[in-house]
Image (tube, grey):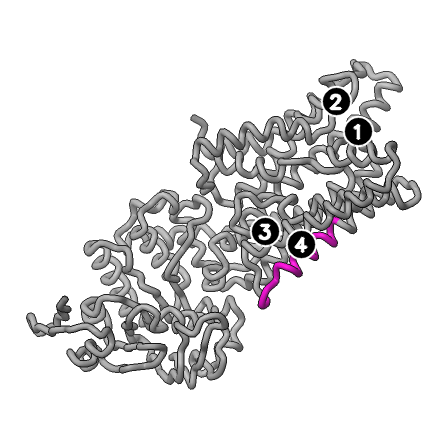
Amino acid sequence: MLSFKKKYYLILLSPLLIAPITLFIGRYPVSFPLSDPERFVLMNIRLPRILLCMMTGAGLSVAGASLQSTLRNPLASPYILGVSQGAAFGAALAMVVLPYSMYLLPISAFIFAFLAITFTCLIARIHGEFSTVTVILSGVIVAGIFTALLSIVKLFSDPYRLSGIVFWMMGGFYRAYWDDILIAAPGFIVGILVLFSIRWRLNVLSMGNEEAKILGVNVKRDTMLVIFFSALICASVISVVGIVAWIGLIIPQIVRGMLGADNRHILPASAAFGAGFLLIVDTICRTLYTFEIPISIITTLIAAPYFVYLLRKIGGSWR
Amino acid sequence: MISIENLHFTYDTRDRFGLYDINLEFRAGEIVALLGPNGSGKTTLLKCLYGAIKLDTGAIYLNGKNLLKFKSSELARHLGGVPQSHIPSFPFKSIDVVVMGRTPHTGIFSSPSEKDYENAREIFKELEIPELTERPYTHISGGERQLVFVARALMQDPKVLLLDEPTAHLDIKNRVKVLRAIKRIAEKNKITVVMSVHDPNEAILFSSKILLLKDGKIQDYGPTEEVIRQETLRELYDTDFSILIEKNRKIVVYNI
């Protein structure tokens, strides 16, 4: 049995061990010394893809862990707050209605992802207070609304674009260029920095509103802070790569199972584990078959059985 | 220390548990027990004191300053508290929960120091629960958890300790443990304690003053010896009481 420290540092290092290996795995064989096309493949196709993939895995996992702590709900995730559905609607709108542009799609997805979280918070705020239940319920409402709006867009799109929407909603890193990283990076970096620097405060918030208040926390402000920056991260990566299911939900659960509850360790470990995990999944997606498999298919097929195992093991009490 | 003037409060949705015309003063170093039947407003009064609810009218002053004027962290450096119920969250180690008591002394971007952890271990020893230190607080008994929360409130280093039925789920051994420790620490550090209890005998053992609440109003407030009387208790609980005297101490017995 590994000691806590060894486990913790092993998790932190894992993506650095995985990344160099995946760089040399792919349908286009690469060997030293590098030829010009090989260098192009590494530098402009695989490297940005690996970086974007790690950002997505880390970002969604950190946002998931933070939301779960703050809302005291182990099932909280970007999905629950309607962020994913908002982004999906924004992306579909860009594909069907707006003129084609490489930048318009992620920007539109980002705007609607943020609009969704804003609605969720506005609806959830009753008498100036947020409660776990109202946040989750209003997330369900907002997700429902954006799913309906998405259906309208689908209804009016031609079959060719419809398949584009469907493919986007399954997520993937197939169009990862340096430009995409530039779009996702600012929100990702700011969000991660803020959440990392308040990660001990997340512990206190997870004690519940009343107790956090007794302990001197400005609960309303801090809850808003966490929701805002989690949403910022999610919207930033989802708007570029599409919907990546289950990562924000499952990674914090796995990491908590290994390291306990303290967010001082859970946040960095979730970031590392999420990055490494998604990198492996993406490598499977792009090498398993002659065409690329959308990433959410594989993440769901891996995560769902794990969730079943978790459910059987702890009998539905997530604590 | 704390004075309450013309406090009036009712919940929007319920007409029970309100508070009406409360005028009170708690002095420094006093240990006050709140007694009263269920729904008499004990918890509501404690919530008002730690600023969790907005008063309809009236005001509460801490050292002459209105509670509303305090920043939440500043207030938590003066008032430590243990709420009545807690829904367990994630499996934090007990010591991590106790160290959360340092929140009002710790900025939002920082976390507690090694020294805070040392102090927390001292408090575990003082409460005679060192064996709980490393155990997840979700996997200890309700009574033990209550002790952990008392330890957390003490970590706040408060001038006033507000405890809502801290002995509710404890067996007699643990009751004595908690009460003894709180009393010792309160007397040593001149902490004012306001604590709701259900057992008048506990109030007699523990407190210097007793506040009787019924239907959201003050029925009586004064030194323990004076307040505990057969008629007042009968009126308070609508129950038949006898009071025995053993070794100069009043013992309250109720009859079925």
Q: CA distance from mark 4 to mark 2?
A: 33 Å
Q: Are marks 1 and 4 in contact (CB under 8 Å)?
A: no
The chain letter for the residue carrying disc 2 is A
Q: Residue at x 18, y 68 (%)?
A: B201
Q: Residue at x 74, y 17 (%)?
A: A289
Establish whether labels 2 and 3 are both on one chain. Answer: yes
Instruction: Report which residue position mark 1 lands on.
Output: A174
- Circle count: 4
Q: CA distance from mark 1 to mark 4?
A: 28 Å
Q: CA distance from mark 2 to mark 3?
A: 35 Å
* Secondary structure of the residue carrying numbered label 4: helix
Q: Is residue A122 magenta?
A: yes
Question: Are there few (<14), some (14-19), or many (20+) residues within 10 Å of tag 3?
Answer: many
Q: Which range is magenta?
A: A113-128
Q: CA distance from mark 1 to mark 3?
A: 32 Å
Q: Residue at x 34, y 81 (%)?
A: B217
Q: Residue at x 7, y 70 (%)?
A: B246
Q: Residue A228, which numbered label?
A: 4
User: Vertical placement of B66 versus A37: above or below?
Assistant: below
The overriding secondary structure of the stretch rendered in magenta is helix
Instruction: Report which residue position mark 2 lands on.
Output: A286
The chain letter for the residue carrying disc 4 is A
Disc 4 residue type? Phe
- Nearer the observer: mark 3 or 4; the answer is 3
* Secondary structure of the residue carrying numbered label 2: helix
Question: Are there few (<14), some (14-19), or many (20+) residues within 10 Å of tag 4?
Answer: some
Nearer-N-terminus badge (1/3): 3
Q: Residue A136, which numbered label?
A: 3
Q: Position of residue B60 (x, y in %)?
A: 44, 80
Position of residue B87 in the picture relative to residue A138 (left or right): left
Q: Are marks 2 and 1 in contact (CB under 8 Å)?
A: yes
